[in-house]
Every structure is written in C-alpha cells, then in structure tokens.
C-alpha cells in the first residue's frame, strides 16, 4: 500500500511539477470550483465537496490529484486570503439564534448568527453580515450583523453590494477604529525630532471643492539668485500607521480608498484621513517633503528629501486657482502664476521627452439628498489641475530615482515602483490600421517612435469627430500600469524611474514608499523580501477599486436614463462586438447596448474585428466605432446595471434610401448572387 502511494506521488510530481499549488478560486453557479494557478496552464477542477470553505475569489492552496481523463483536479487544503468577509442577505430568526441567507449567485453556506451578534435585527431584515469565524469542515461559519439596510434606500444597498463584491468591507472593524482613536491629536516635542521646520514658509493646498482629505500641499519661496524654492509636502501617514498593527494590516488589505459617485470607502479611519493627516489650513501638520530649487526655465537645480512640519496658510479649490490663472488676480496671485508657468514648462518638456498626451475628462453625477442622479457634469483637466499634477509627478519621479541608486547587500532595495511597460506591437497592429483610415500614420519601429506617433495623432485629432474614439482605442492598446519591484520605467509618462509617494491617505504603496525613504535617509534599510508579493496584492486591489467605481457609475447611468425610456438621443458608437454595438450618448455620457437582434429587420450583420465595425451583408450598411448614431432608450435594468438602446434610422433612411428600399434591394442582390 505504501509503495502504491509512493508511485502515485512520483507520478503526480512528474505530471504537475508540484503537488501543492496556490491559485485564485472561481465558483460557478452549479457549485463547481475552478482554480487558476500561475505555474499551471489549465485550470484545476474542484468538486463542491472538496472546497473546504473556500468561496469565490479566495486565494487558496490546492493539493493536486489524479482525475478521470485528462482533467486536472484538486482538493483545497487551505484558504490563504479571503476576497471578502462581508455579505448582503436576509436574516431568518429562530429561538436563541438566527441564520443569515446570503444573496449571491455563487453557492455559499448559510451563516450562523448568535442573537448577541444580531444588532437587534428582526426576522427577514436585509442586512450586511461579517463572518467572524469561518468554522471547521462540516460546521457553519459564524457571523455578526454589521448594519441593517433601509428597505426604502435601494441606492445605498446597491453601492454597498458593489463594494462587497469587489472585496472592500463596508466598515472598518472595532479594533482598527480603536487604534486610530488612541492616536494623539497634539504634536509633541518628540514628534519634531529630525524634522525641518517649514511653518513660516507660504504654503497652500489645491484640491476639489468637496475634498476633506488634503494629503498634499505646495510651498513657494523666491530665492536671491533668481530661482524658486518649491516644496511638495505630503501628509506623513506612516508616522501614525505603524507596521503590523491592526490599523496597518487593515490598510494593507484594502490597499486603496474607493471613490463611488455618492460616497468614499476610505482606506484609513476618518480620524486619520480627515483630521490627523489632512493638511488643513491654520494647523501644524507632520509631513514628508520633496524640496526643489527650480530655475525660471523649470530646470531642477537641486533637491532635498526629508521629514518636516508645515502650516498651511490657505485652502484653495481648483476652480478658485483656475480663476486666478485666467484673470491674473486673486489671493497669492504672483506665486500661483509663477508656479503655473513652471508647471506648463515642465509639462511641455515631458511630452517632448516621450510622455503621451492623452486628454482626460471626468464625468460626475449631480445627486439629490437620496443619492439619486439629477444631472451630469463633465470636468476637464485645466491648468489648475495640471499645476498640481506636474509637481506631484516631479516628487514621485525624484523619490523613485533616489531610492534606485541605493544598494544593500549588493542588491537594489526592494521597492514598489509604479511601472508601465512598452506597448505590445502585435496589439498595436489593428489600432494602427484603424487610425490610418482617418489619415493618421504610425511609426512602430521603436517605443520612442510609437510615443511620438501617438502625440502627433493626438495633436491633429484635437477637436475632430474621431478624437474620442481614437483616444479610447489608443488607451486600450496600452499595457496596464501596476506596482512592481522590477523597474521597467513608466512608458506613458516617459519616466525611467517612477513611484507613488504623494497620496498616502488613499494608497497603501505610498505608505510603503514613505517607510523605505525614511529608512534610506537614516541609513537603516531593512530589505523587505516580500515586497513583490505586496506589489501584486496592491495592484490587484487597485484593479478591484477601478471595477467597483465603473460598476457604481454604470448603476448611476442606468438609474439616470431610466427616466427617459422611449426617448431618443444622439450618441457615438463606443464599442463593437459580434452581438451588437455600444453607444455612449453625447450629452449624458451614458452607455448602452444596441443588440444585433434588433438590427435583423434591416439586414444581417457580420463583425469586422480589425475595422471595429458591424457590416450589413446585403446593404453594406456599416456601424463603426466612432460613428454618430441616433438611439432610443428601450430598457434600464438596475439589477444587471444594463442599458438597452435601439438604433433609430436617421430620418427613416439609410444611405439615401428608405429602410424598406434597402431591405428589398438587399434581398434582390442576395437572390442574384445565388
């Protein structure tokens, strides 16, 4: 018997390389599990009886086993990391206890709720529950009610569900809040040790009008030699968030704040983000500073990095600063105009050196007191935004380059660089072909020539009908930015060295950068050999936050357009697939699907992938990405976050002929071909 097991084990190792692997669990509606592991090509089948409490999205450890046929199978031996621990569902009350029935399309066990953990919820209440004990095999997990949902507020429940399905808890746990509450509000003499006092230098913040967490400030001084000293001051969050505390572990697990249309799900407790660390005016604050001596032509002559204490004199919003830039008058007008001049010169140099000038616009919903959308606002990047952006980019790049030159034990310091890889030439081919149809040429011989071609196209396309579609498609061809210890540079920004240093209130990698920088400045670097693993985690959490934000915006779009069922709007085709095309309305910026089934009365259409279009087999009618079309709103499904549109024929005609004429001509053409 022992020999047989030994043979099986050898066979397993020779087939799979390892008998235990780590991967991400995906559970189907039927309850079957599939694990994707980095070192194995095919996914691993997990029967429901072998899930061992693993849920959809969890990172698990799997023991491989021989399956029938060629199908790779396994047994979950442990859960390494839970994707989520909070769920929305209903309570079923019993004598002395309750059961929580999750609302999920993925199978999962009911959760046992002791009455002491029910927060006075009643039978059939819709609640958010946090699992406190996952239980052993064969036992139900135990949980506690975090909050009772208001049955009259569907929006609140929807936003919470979006956060939870992407792995972001609704509330921070009591132990995390307790650590934050114990942090002193007063800056002590010990806190000022090894800090440069910059409180007497003119300093101000520039943020959105509704912001509460001000994590960066700018200071300005004219020097006698004609140069300027510009300080980029960043909230010293790492002073308060100490490694390995409950607060630090929770911040790392979330890794980012999540910004939804009607709320912020913060990475840190509000006592830290909005009070202790927020660089509010007329308050002394502990900061990390990148100080630059800059010549009038924007060349950096020298810099200094270190811990500081500052005192912000003024809190500006972007609109106020933009008004000063445009009018030339206002509070601290001279300093703001000089800073803006420097920023614009830095910006021009950046694009000349290979950065790609993709324009950005932010679509935001105006909400009523219930969180329901009542209007749309489109905010574009103006010089006030660019002023802050350029100095933040300068600080981020400077810190990354400074750390890159430090060697410990004959190796570079493990550091969370922010990287953006060169474009994949194969992925560029269809885009280059598509851009050529609009008259834009691309040189793809080198990464530098690709960036130059993009900038030439973006300059020429500005204000043209095809601008939006070419910008969107161009962005999609690019690699995704991420965190990594392997510094390959940041292609989109044109930087050899780059990191995130300037937003520690809302991003965990910035806290990591602050800790490593502090160690480097005091010569006490302790290399973190798990830094790459942490980079993978924070990159994944960033993607999850972006997905949550997209889902929430989509929910608001559906909610808003549900008021206009049957109405017609002008739109632009924003995407094409074999089953239809997406249209974004011009005025509302709300995207919906025109199903190919709704087009069958006019023609049969085929998907031409490299042309991003659907083409009629008989009429030749083409629906191509970027085309303007008119649509009618058919349906708005909030639960699926989906808008369905119907194409409206322009003045009842296609290419100068009526729909019936086209249909008849198509049939005749088809008959003649036969």
Image (tube, rainbow, N blue to C red):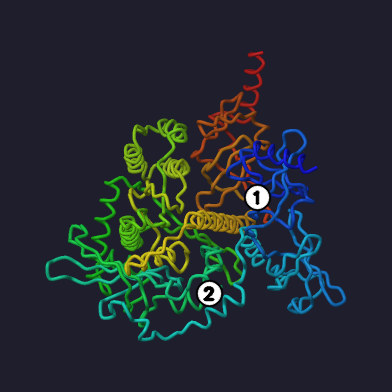
Q: Distance between the residues labelled 2 and 1?
A: 45 Å
Residue at 43 percent of width and 59 percent of height: 379
Q: In the image, residue 643 lies at what x, y percent? A: 63, 50
Residue at 64 percent of width and 29 percent of height: 603
Q: Nearer the viewer, residue 236 or 444?
A: 236
Q: Nearer the viewer, residue 508 or 526?
A: 526
Q: In the image, residue 348 lies at what x, y percent? A: 27, 51
Residue at 72 percent of width and 38 percent of height: 7
Q: Nearer the viewer, residue 512 or 563?
A: 512
The number of numbered badges drawn on the structure is 2
Quarter of the view holding residue 449: top left
Q: In the image, residue 50 lies at what x, y percent? A: 76, 51
Secondary structure of the residue carrying tag 2 is loop
Residue at 53 percent of width and 46 percent of height: 570
Which numbered tag is attached to residue 92? Answer: none
- Quarter holding the N terminus is top right
380 on left or right of 348: right
Which residue in the structure is indicated by mark 2?
Answer: 269
Tell me if mark 2 has few (under 14), some (14-19) or many (20+) residues whose alpha carbon lies within 10 angstroms of its own: many
Q: Which of marks 2 and 1 is in front?
A: 2
Which residue in the structure is indicated by mark 1?
Answer: 566
Tell me if mark 1 has few (under 14), some (14-19) or many (20+) residues whose alpha carbon lies within 10 angstroms of its own: some
């Amino acid at each position: 018997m022992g020999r047989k097991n030994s043979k099986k084990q050898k066979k397993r190792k020779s087939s799979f390389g390892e008998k235990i692997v780590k991967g991400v669990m995906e559970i189907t509606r039927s309850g079957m599990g599939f694990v994707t592991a980095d070192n194995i090509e095919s996914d691993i089948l997990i029967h429901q009886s072998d899930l061992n409490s693993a849920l959809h999205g969890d990172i698990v450890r799997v023991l491989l086993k021989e399956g029938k046929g060629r199908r790779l199978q396994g047994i979950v031996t442990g859960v390494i990391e839970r994707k989520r621990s909070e769920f929305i569902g209903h309570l079923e009350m019993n004598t002395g206890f309750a059961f929580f029935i999750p609302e999920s399309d993925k199978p999962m066990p009911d959760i046992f709720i002791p009455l002491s953990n029910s927060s006075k919820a009643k039978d059939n209440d819709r609640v958010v529950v946090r699992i406190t004990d996952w239980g052993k095999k064969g036992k139900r997990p135990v949980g506690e009610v975090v909050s009772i949902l208001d049955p009259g507020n569907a929006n609140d429940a929807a936003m919470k569900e979006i956060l939870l399905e992407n792995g972001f808890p609704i509330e921070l746990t009591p132990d995390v809040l307790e650590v934050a509450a114990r942090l002193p509000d007063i800056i002590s003499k010990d806190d000022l040790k090894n800090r440069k006092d910059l409180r007497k230098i003119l300093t101000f913040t520039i943020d959105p009008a509704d912001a509460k967490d001000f994590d960066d400030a700018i200071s300005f001084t004219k020097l006698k030699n004609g140069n300027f000293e510009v300080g980029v001051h960043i909230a010293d969050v790492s002073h308060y968030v100490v490694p390995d505390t409950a607060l630090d572990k929770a911040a790392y697990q979330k890794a980012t704040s999540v910004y939804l249309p009607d709320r912020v799900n913060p990475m840190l407790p509000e006592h830290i983000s909005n009070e202790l660390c927020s660089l509010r005016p007329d308050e002394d604050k502990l900061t990390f500073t990148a100080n630059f001596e800059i010549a009038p032509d924007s060349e950096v002559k020298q810099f200094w990095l270190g811990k500081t204490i500052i005192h912000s004199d003024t809190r500006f919003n972007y609109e106020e600063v933009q008004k000063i830039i445009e009018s030339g008058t206002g509070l601290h007008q001279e300093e703001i105009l000089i800073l803006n001049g420097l920023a614009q010169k830095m910006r021009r140099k950046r694009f000349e050196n290979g950065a790609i000038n993709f324009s950005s616009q932010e679509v935001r919903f105006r909400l009523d007191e219930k969180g329901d959308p009542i209007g749309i606002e489109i905010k574009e990047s103006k010089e006030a935004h660019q002023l802050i952006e350029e100095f933040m980019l300068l600080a981020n790049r400077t810190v990354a380059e400074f750390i890159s030159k430090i060697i410990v034990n004959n190796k570079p310091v493990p550091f969370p660089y922010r990287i953006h890889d060169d474009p994949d030439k194969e992925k560029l081919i269809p885009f280059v072909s598509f851009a050529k149809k609009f008259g834009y040429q691309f040189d793809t011989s080198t990464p530098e020539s690709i960036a130059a071609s993009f900038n030439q196209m973006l300059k020429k396309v500005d204000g043209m009908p095809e601008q939006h579609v070419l910008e969107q498609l161009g962005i999609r061809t690019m690699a995704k930015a991420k965190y990594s210890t392997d510094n390959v540079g940041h292609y989109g920004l044109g930087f050899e060295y780059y990191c995130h240093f300037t937003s520690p209130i809302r991003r965990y990698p910035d806290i990591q950068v602050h800790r490593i920088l502090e160690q480097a400045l005091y010569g006490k670097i302790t290399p973190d050999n798990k830094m790459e693993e942490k980079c993978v985690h924070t990159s994944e959490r960033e993607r999850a936050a972006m997905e949550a934000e997209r889902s929430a915006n989509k929910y608001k779009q559906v909610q808003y357009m549900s008021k206009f069922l049957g109405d017609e709007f002008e739109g632009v085709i924003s995407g094409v697939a074999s089953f239809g095309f997406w249209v974004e309305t011009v005025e509302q910026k709300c995207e919906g699907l025109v199903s190919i089934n709704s087009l069958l009365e006019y023609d049969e259409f085929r998907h031409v992938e490299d042309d991003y279009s659907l083409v009629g087999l008989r009429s030749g009618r083409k629906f191509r990405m970027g085309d303007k079309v008119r649509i009618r709103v058919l349906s708005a499904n909030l639960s699926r976050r989906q808008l369905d549109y119907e194409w409206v024929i322009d003045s009842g005609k296609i290419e100068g002929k009526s729909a019936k004429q086209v249909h008849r001509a198509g049939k005749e053409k088809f008959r003649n071909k036969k």
